[in-house]
């Protein structure tokens, strides 16, 4: 299991190997030992651990079973070491639910576009085709519905736009910059080691968790069941999303059930398919549903699968366009520095015949870009200055700015722990070494599948977003009601161990 690089780091410069990663790798065999007794833990040649007492006796230790919440308790690595069994978020747990509990539950699966892009690339098919076959796969396994997560992403974007405008225009009340919080790897790192960053985090839930909220509160009603009787699985590109789903903040209050019960990754789907001996490409396409219970056939998906340009949610771009218009009255068009990353665009009415073109500019490396809206009266003073910051080393630049006396140079920062963002998440399917396909080549193919598999549309142009606010929230974006449903909070977590590497083995 591979988490993002931010979660593999306790310091600024070095990676932690799996055997050093966790403060609870084994369960102690000592019961009621004397305070003065000397005990050491010894690593055996076969990879197991033994407890060696002062008298020379040795006791074999069992691997500890820890939950993902236990992982959040220390400042160390959150990878799964070979000696640690993470039992709550796995294919085995999914099969256990299918075999033992599905007769009491309705299985609902939400699929992210980055995940279906990775799977489509693996099977050399289109994005809509892969999504239709994933729907067939999960329905064959007993799913009552398979949902596209794009509506939840659009809701997250709409709330993020409104939140930024509020915080920018009320700076005495809220902090600037606003830092995107949809990446759980970044959030976990900030909560444990960078507490100064917490006031700047966006309070908007990630698309995964908004999906969880709506599935348990809206879709449950469509199925005619209680939230606790839905088992909600999300298919995501990132192992860190398992940590996010396990947070106590994301529990449906009335039923006391998790909003997302289980997260599977793109790579784990290959394991699932192999263990069930399924020929994925021979499966008959099945439709997907939306959160209102309406069916979209595989044919419809070819024409109605809408998305955003950025493969990590497009937060910075959408917030930039919205803020430029609503704060400064300027209509802008955001362009990438290169021309090979365009998507088919869903045309919509525009209030300006000639919007201002703003171009993402690479600053430090390919994972750090700036986007600026200049003041025509003072070209040295940007009206808006945004950044896309991917990867742990780039994150450190933002952290240093936050801690400096000058403050951060940006008004908004889209932060992702993984280099290249979510499309390159740790849970994505990697190139098979036997094919000699380079990782960069595979990444470019997944990006292309993502872009060609959907039509770009502004989240504000999604009619289902309007329906959610009217029929579910009964209020406007960033209102008290929407904040209660679609926002969360973050917490400084006290380190229980100053340095996990100080353990004596």
Image (cartoon, rainbow, N blue to C red):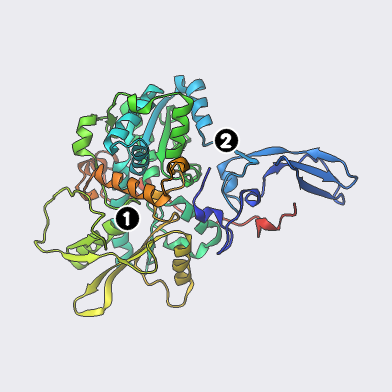
Residue 221 in view, yes or no: no
Above-or-below relation of 272 to 434 = above
Identity of the residue drawn at 44% across and 59% down: 391
Query: Which secondary structure, mark 2?
Result: loop
- Residue 316's x, y, as percent? 31, 59
Q: Are marks 1 and 2 in contact (CB under 8 Å)?
A: no
Identity of the residue drawn at 56% across and 64% down: 13
Determine the CA span between mark 1 and mark 2: 33 Å
- Residue topped by disc 2: 87
- Residue topped by disc 1: 315
Residue 15 falls left or right of residue 61? left
Residue 127 falls left or right of residue 80? left
Query: Which is nearer the N-term, disc 1 or disc 2?
Result: 2
Query: Which secondary structure, mark 1?
Result: helix
Residue 375 in view, yes or no: yes
Q: Which mark is residue 444?
A: none
- Residue 51's x, y, as percent? 79, 43
Q: Quadrant of residue 337?
A: bottom left
Q: Residue furthest top?
A: 103
């Amino acid at each position: 299991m591979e988490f993002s690089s931010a979660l593999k780091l306790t310091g600024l410069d070095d990676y932690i190997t799996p055997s050093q990663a966790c403060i609870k790798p084994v369960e102690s065999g000592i019961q009621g030992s004397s305070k003065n007794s000397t005990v050491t833990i010894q690593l055996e040649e076969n990879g197991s651990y033994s407890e060696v007492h002062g008298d020379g006796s040795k006791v074999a230790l069992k691997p500890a079973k820890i939950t993902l919440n236990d992982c959040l308790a220390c400042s160390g690595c959150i990878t799964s070491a070979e000696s640690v069994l993470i039992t709550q978020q796995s294919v085995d747990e999914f099969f256990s639910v299918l075999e033992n509990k599905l007769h009491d539950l309705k299985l609902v699966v939400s699929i992210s576009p980055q995940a279906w892009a990775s799977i489509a690339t693996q099977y050399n098919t289109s994005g809509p085709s892969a999504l239709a076959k994933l729907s067939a796969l999960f329905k064959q396994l007993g799913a009552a519905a398979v949902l596209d997560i794009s509506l939840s992403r659009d809701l997250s974007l709409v709330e993020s736009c409104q939140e930024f405008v509020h915080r920018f225009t009320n700076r005495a009340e809220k902090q600037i910059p606003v830092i995107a919080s949809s990446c759980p790897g970044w959030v976990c790192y900030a909560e444990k080691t960078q507490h100064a960053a917490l006031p700047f985090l966006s309070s908007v839930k990630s698309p995964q968790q908004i999906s969880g909220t709506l599935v348990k509160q809206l879709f449950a009603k469509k199925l005619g069941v209680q939230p606790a009787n839905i088992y909600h699985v999300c298919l995501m590109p990132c192992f860190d999303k398992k940590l996010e789903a396990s947070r106590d903040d994301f529990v449906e209050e009335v039923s006391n059930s998790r909003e997302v019960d289980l997260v599977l990754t793109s790579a784990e789907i290959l394991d699932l398919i192999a263990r069930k001996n399924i020929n994925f490409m021979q499966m008959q396409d099945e439709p997907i549903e939306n959160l209102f219970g309406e069916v979209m056939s595989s044919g419809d998906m070819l024409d109605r699968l809408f998305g955003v340009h950025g493969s990590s949610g497009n937060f910075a771009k959408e917030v930039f366009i919205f803020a430029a218009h609503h704060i400064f009255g300027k209509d802008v068009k955001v362009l990438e520095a290169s021309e090979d990353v365009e998507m088919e665009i869903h045309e919509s009415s525009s209030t300006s015949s000639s919007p201002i073109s703003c171009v993402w500019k690479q600053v430090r490396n390919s994972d750090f870009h700036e986007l600026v809206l200049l003041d025509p009266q003072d070209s040295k003073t940007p009206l808006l200055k945004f950044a896309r910051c991917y990867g742990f080393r780039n994150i450190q630049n933002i952290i240093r700015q936050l801690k400096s006396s000058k403050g951060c140079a940006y008004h908004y920062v889209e932060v992702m722990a993984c280099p290249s963002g979510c499309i390159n998440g740790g849970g994505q399917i990697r190139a098979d070494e036997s094919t000699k396909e380079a990782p960069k080549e595979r990444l470019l193919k997944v990006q292309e599948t993502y872009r060609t598999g959907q039509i770009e549309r502004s989240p504000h142009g999604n009619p289902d977003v309007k329906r959610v606010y009217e029929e579910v929230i009964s209020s406007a974006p960033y209102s008290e009601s929407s904040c209660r449903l679609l926002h969360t909070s973050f917490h400084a977590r006290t380190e229980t161990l100053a340095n996990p590497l100080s353990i004596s083995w």
